[in-house]
């Protein structure tokens, strides 16, 4: 299995499809939080007809090394560095496209593009947004919220954030405290402050995507409860000239559940921008 060591000496699993076909354009696929590169299983047969494909499991996911705790990890920025490290290892010096799924995958794709605009030829965001969901605390918090709250999160958070945090905090605290070690009152207070800080940072310091100017396809899903479609619409409004498509009657994992429809929309976008290349050699 192909692995590389990142800057922290952690093993990161990756795959390259059509590795020897250097005449093909390149696409990098970035999975969501708690997922793996296997999420794109139903896109690979279609994409490999036109691209050299680079996939990897972020640290803490899939076959890559898992840390004892990712609570203090700035996983998006550290994974941006891992991606660049992998591209250097593969000696990729041409421009390439990025396709990211879910909030983690989309934020990582956006962050990389913002930091390296000269390297990214196109961007595809699937069921994502600009809310940073990149560690255990933030993931538990988001999953604890009922559907109505997630669907109207921005408005509710402006008026009731303290209430939301107060209600979710005991559950998050219980989930992250070590089971085999008794935690003192002072340590519990530190954990509470850490939880609150992570949640506030998630809300306040989301990605600002407006400088992105490369061709961009944004796909949301009508029934997505995890990354509601309003996030896709907001992202579309912030990235000028982006193409928005809200897929009907599917949810967060539409790319695997109704892959043919997703692939058709992606192919139409790629064809319009003359990005695809026939892999028949």
Image (cartoon, helix red, strand yellow):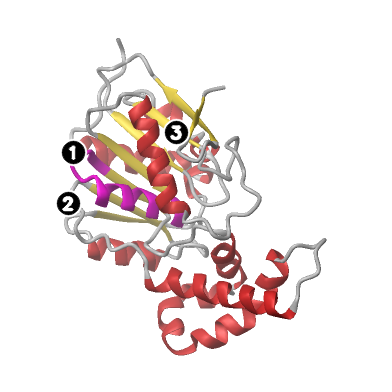
Q: Seen in the image, is 241 located left or right of residue 229? A: left
Label 2–label 3 contact, CB within 8 A: no
Q: Give the mark nearer the N terminus: 1 vs 3.
A: 3
**Mark-to-mark CA distance, 1 and 3:** 23 Å
Which residue sits at x=65%, y=79%?
Answer: 189
Check the image and report above or below for 80 versus 86.
below
In front of the other: 24 or 261: 24
Q: Give the mark nearer the N terminus: 2 vs 3.
A: 3
Q: Give the mark nearer the N terminus: 2 vs 1.
A: 2
Q: How many marks?
A: 3
- Kindly indicate the quadrant of the structure image that contains residue 193: bottom right
Please provide percent x and percent y for residue 142: 55, 68
Q: Is residue 101 visible?
A: no
Q: What element carries label 1?
A: loop
- Kindly indicate the quadrant of the structure image that contains residue 221: bottom left
Tag shown at residue 213: 2
Tag shown at residue 273: 1
Binning the other alpha carbons within 10 Å of mark 2 as few (below 14), some (14 to 19) or many (20 upward) gives some
Q: Mark 3 points at which residue?
A: 55
- Kindly indicate the quadrant of the structure image that contains residue 209: bottom left
Mark 1 or 3, closer to the camera: 3
């Amino acid at each position: 299995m192909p692995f590389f060591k990142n800057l922290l000496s952690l093993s990161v699993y990756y795959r390259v499809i059509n590795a020897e076909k250097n005449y093909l354009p390149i696409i990098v696929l970035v999975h969501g939080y708690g997922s793996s590169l296997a999420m794109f299983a139903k896109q690979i047969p279609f994409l490999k007809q036109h691209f050299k494909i680079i996939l990897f499991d972020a640290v803490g996911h899939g076959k890559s090394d898992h840390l004892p705790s990712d609570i203090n990890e700035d996983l998006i920025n550290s994974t941006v560095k891992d991606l660049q490290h992998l591209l250097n290892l593969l000696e990729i010096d041409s421009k390439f496209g990025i396709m990211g799924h879910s909030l983690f995958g989309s934020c990582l794709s956006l962050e990389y593009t913002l930091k390296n605009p000269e390297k990214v030829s196109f961007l595809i965001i699937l069921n994502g947004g600009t809310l940073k969901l990149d560690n255990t605390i933030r993931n538990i918090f988001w999953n604890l919220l009922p559907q109505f709250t997630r669907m109207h999160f921005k408005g509710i958070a402006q008026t009731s954030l303290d209430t939301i945090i107060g209600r979710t905090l005991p559950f998050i605290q219980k989930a992250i405290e070590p089971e085999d070690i008794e935690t003192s009152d002072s340590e519990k207070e530190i954990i509470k402050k850490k939880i609150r800080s992570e949640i506030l940072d998630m809300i306040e310091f989301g990605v600002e995507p407006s400088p992105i100017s490369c061709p961009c396809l944004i796909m949301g899903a009508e029934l997505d409860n995890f990354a509601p479609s309003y996030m896709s619409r907001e992202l579309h409004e912030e990235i000028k000239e982006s193409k928005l498509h809200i897929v009907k009657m599917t949810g967060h994992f539409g790319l695997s559940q109704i892959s043919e429809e997703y692939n058709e929309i992606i192919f139409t976008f790629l064809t319009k921008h003359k990005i695809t290349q026939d892999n028949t050699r």
